[in-house]
Image: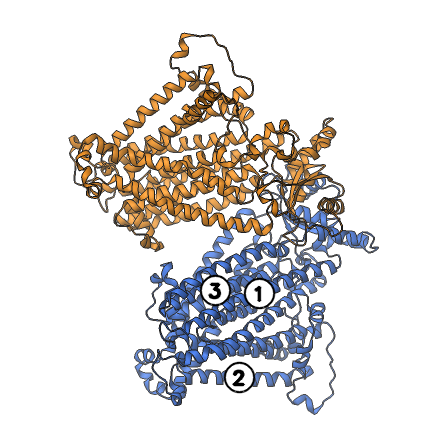
Chain colours: A blue, B orange
Amino acid sequence: MIVSALLTSVGINLVVCVVYFTLYSILRKQPSYNHVYIPRLVAEGKAKNSGDFHLDRLLPSTGWVKRAWQLSEDDLLSSTGLDAVVFIRILTFSIKVFTVAAVIGIFILLPINYFGTQIHALDFADIPNKSLDLFSIANVNDGSKRLWVHFCVVYFITAFVCYLLFIEYKYISLKRIVFFYASKPQPHQFTVLVHGAPVSRHGKFSESIRNFFMEYHPSTYLSHTVVNTPSRIKSLIEVPAAFVSFKTRYGAAVVSDMRQSDNPTEWVTEQAPEPRDVYWPFFSPSFMQRWISKLVVIVLSIVLTVLFLIPVVFVQGLTNLNQLKKLFPFMKGILNITFINQVITGYLPSLILTLFLKIVPPIMMLFSSMQGFSSYSRIERSACTKVLIFTVWNIFFANVLSGSAIMQLEDLLEPKNIPMKLAVAVPAQASFFIAYVVTNGWTSLASEIFRVSPLLWTSLKNCVGSHDFDPPSLPFHSEVPRILFFGLLGLTYVFLAPLILPFLLAYFCLGYIVYRNQLLDVFEPRYETGGKLWPTVHNSTIFSLLLLQTIAIGIFGLKKLPVASTLILPLLIITLLFNEYCRKRFLPIFESHSAESVIKKDRENENDPTMPEFLEKLPTAYRDPALKPNQESAGNHYHSTPLLSSV
Amino acid sequence: MIVSALLTSVGINLVVCVVYFTLYSILRKQPSYNHVYIPRLVAEGKAKNSGDFHLDRLLPSTGWVKRAWQLSEDDLLSSTGLDAVVFIRILTFSIKVFTVAAVIGIFILLPINYFGTQIHALDFADIPNKSLDLFSIANVNDGSKRLWVHFCVVYFITAFVCYLLFIEYKYISLKRIVFFYASKPQPHQFTVLVHGAPVSRHGKFSESIRNFFMEYHPSTYLSHTVVNTPSRIKSLIEVPAAFVSFKTRYGAAVVSDMRQSDNPTEWVTEQAPEPRDVYWPFFSPSFMQRWISKLVVIVLSIVLTVLFLIPVVFVQGLTNLNQLKKLFPFMKGILNITFINQVITGYLPSLILTLFLKIVPPIMMLFSSMQGFSSYSRIERSACTKVLIFTVWNIFFANVLSGSAIMQLEDLLEPKNIPMKLAVAVPAQASFFIAYVVTNGWTSLASEIFRVSPLLWTSLKNCVGSHDFDPPSLPFHSEVPRILFFGLLGLTYVFLAPLILPFLLAYFCLGYIVYRNQLLDVFEPRYETGGKLWPTVHNSTIFSLLLLQTIAIGIFGLKKLPVASTLILPLLIITLLFNEYCRKRFLPIFESHSAESVIKKDRENENDPTMPEFLEKLPTAYRDPALKPNQESAGNHYHSTPLLSSV
């Protein structure tokens, strides 16, 4: 891709963004669009519905930017919960990393790259038609001493990112603990979900549950609710589960942490999700079913990944103009028009990929829902990981590999060649990924705030007179992988082709404003996991660092600086050790609460006069909304909607 | 290696075995050798020390074989504990597997191999000088339909072994549970080991422990013993630990299963080992120390593995006579004498390897002791895994690879080539491994029962007049890897070169008799883990099956039967799934006791009149023998002896 094609792409997207943001700042002030732009406030009854007309309602304004910017973290926490705060911290973390990376990249590495002579083309006047490779490490001369600067940057960036990761993990762990200490008594803190209870011969299932817990936990057992799935798809397999409630949090924690039965596949316990978070359809598969469905999901995911190679290869074909002319000789005339060929090679490939990528999160969500998870939050977290792996593989690796003719899949199967192959292929794709950041990043944010599809959908519904209305929740499983993938792009390209960094930084800053705004106005939290998302972010960033180091090993080998190549190895090992340390130090905090904290909370509530009432209501907290009369299920509407429509 | 060289090796070892067994059956009847041959009975005061002389005391006899054979499993359990029973079950499991495998191998596969014509040498009369390859799959013609028999054998053996593995895992799990239910109250059931307790500012460490458990577990906390290590190597780092005892098993189980503190690196709890099993030296490293020492141990193990390649390559040089003649031309005369060259190529290689291998278990034991484990049993289990990995890598892979000139290490780094390379190299080493089984297996058993080194050692001590005496314990970490490695050899060679199977079967049967005899007369159990060894055996067998299948994929590819090659893949996946299922179904039973079982045991003891006395003594159960007066430490002598001398 040449510079002019890239500039065309940036230009098109910039125009789209400006138009969307301008329209948004006008439309959000029109009360008739309240359902689109401030659905959360509408649902909470906070929307001002004044019909008074003022002239400034028709002018674009930036008041919403100021509000989103000034919002403090405590305010965000109280109005949207810890999960949203953690989500925003992914963005602030990225901004911190890429501000430093961009300064180093643009002011130190870019000049070094540009004044190399490996690619013999130092004609300043001719830049727009030259390849962007001039600004990449490819232009530094083989064996040059200047490569040690790149080497130092790899070390510095790794150290800086690990430092920030540690600080963040510590901060969020602490927030999580404080959040728990500050929480009111909630049903899920006192409840355990029990699978695989054997049915006694002489009694019913419910009796069997009562007998077991009365036998072994008589002092803490309170009550239980058997989960019935009478009219479901899975009703033919009758594997029962139950929510068992206890008098104290400690009682519930002990039961969920300890293996209950001598047979590990019976009386399997886990912490109960929040009542609103329970995923009632497809509930409670048996040990073997859960296992087989997991296997099926893995196979389906692989099939999807393989099928997705088709658009990827097609897109990479588009970026290569000469190949295109050969394949479609009749289009030669059109392709020779400069603007059209710049659109086709610069803008179209990222656009097509972005459109294809839209269908992946809902599919992964469907796959995860088949795995037998008991809560919507677990399904979404699992889908988030799937989408992330899919994106990294299909957008990063498949593009990089199919883009370079020298690569063949079987070469990649030789592990020792991987660093070298990546070192050749990755820098060559810099311009494609800049275009991708602009199209998939910037414009996605703009259409997120402009809410294109809800806008169209509402207009349609207004036509047919329907007024059904639910404020949406933040789709973590599609947004988090996107942000993490851009983080991966930034970290791998920081020393290869630093020109991508300003574009990424712009994305993260824009995202920071947009998502804070949407969290206030649009998204209503569907569940609260207390920031259980963070370990995924941490692991993904560690993977990005390892990828950066692997490519560095290859690059320094390729650039005839084998000493530098070897000296990266200790860094790789240190990074793995750092990750292992964090796993030990912080991860358990995200898995369960400590005895110390649950006992403290129980003590706190001992003399609370509202506790008897809370415990009295506890047995009815978990009830399938499908079994309730219609008017009761309104608040829990999403539980029984198919997953695809909710995405 | 030619048949005559192999026969020489078998002959030499057979003679050694017969001599050892004969001498043993005479010497064990001499009262002056009681300390060597029945030390356990001596220590228990059950040895008959009658000085009467009978003629039959000088004649070899087989009474001990009959006794060892007839011993029932229940008797073994009551006299030697569950660990010994599980050890013997490894042998019975192997006997079952290899009886079936040998029948199939000798009566079905061997004729098929022999009547192939790939190696053109069908001269019956000339067998002794022909290569053993005639009996291996190498002799079956490429693309022959008869290879489908081999294919079926791979499937059948996998199914049969998996079936037996399942039965065994289930049986031993049940034994373990029953063993726990039948146990008397023991200090370690009521005790938890606490690491990383923060020292309070105003108090001492002991106070800090008391305060914590009085605060959070007031109803079950009984007492604690702080571990002091005043005069140790590690004394400069003063990281304190404590044994905390509880009034009930359930109280202890809850504390050891739950994370206690908000900071996961503080108040780290684990089930306490038995008092006799505690490894007092090097006690209680901090979180970071344990971690760094683990890293150091990994590096050291790798160094040892690399250094060990020297004897392996040397040994493989010996098996190649022509190469030897070239390297040492002055020895040509000697090497031309048939018997000497048969000894050098047939017997010497295995003997040298066996001698070098003798030093590995003590070194691995030392490494494991540096990792900060709190009990001797954990150290031994960890050393067992290390020795096993070392043996499989250095004896199997290094021999196979260095033995075939076509192999180079860098080729092996290409994963897709591994099956093919192994398929070429593994069958070629069949005769070497037969010699190895005979030398390392048969003769080791014979010298185990004859107890060569204790015999020499006792003779020496008698000369200087010393009478210090400790019955040894069964060295699981050197014996289990040996048995498992022979299992691996058998499973991989079952369809490649079935001639090895009778030799292996003879080893397992002999081992069954010898070890049962030694468990009764010689070894005194040093600890009781309730069969925690079995998961290692299970995993090792699964690995052997996967190796068998990988080689099968290569072999069928090599033999131009690609369909069979592809059809092995599902088997590989099914085996992995089977292993995963067993992990879920049985492994938790070996990690901790269930709430059900500990509560039942507690109830059982509620009205036991001896319990108050037991609980009164509990606080003094854990005390460093180094701090006790000398006469008290006699029974715990081994705790403070260096590990190397105990092996």
What type is the residue that disc 2 sits on? Val
Q: Above or below — where is A35 with respect to B449?
A: below
Q: Above or below — where is B207 with respect to A592?
A: above
- Quadrant of the image occupied by residue A136: bottom left
Indicate left or right for B402 with A297 as reference. Answer: left
Residue A278 seen: yes
Q: Which comes sooner in the sequence, label 3 or label 1?
A: 1
Q: Are marks 2 and 3 in contact (CB under 8 Å)?
A: no
Give coordinates of residue A577: x percent, y percent: 52, 57
Q: Are marks 1 and 2 in contact (CB under 8 Å)?
A: no
Marker count (numbered)? 3
- Quadrant of the image occupied by residue B432: top left
Q: Would you call the spot at circle 3 few (<14 residues within 10 Å), some (14-19), or many (20 or more)?
A: many
Give coordinates of residue B615: x percent, y percent: 72, 32
Q: Which residue is mark 1?
A: A163
Q: Which residue is mark 2?
A: A16
Labels 1, 2: one chain: yes
Q: Which residue is mark 3?
A: A390
Query: Chain for mark 2?
Result: A
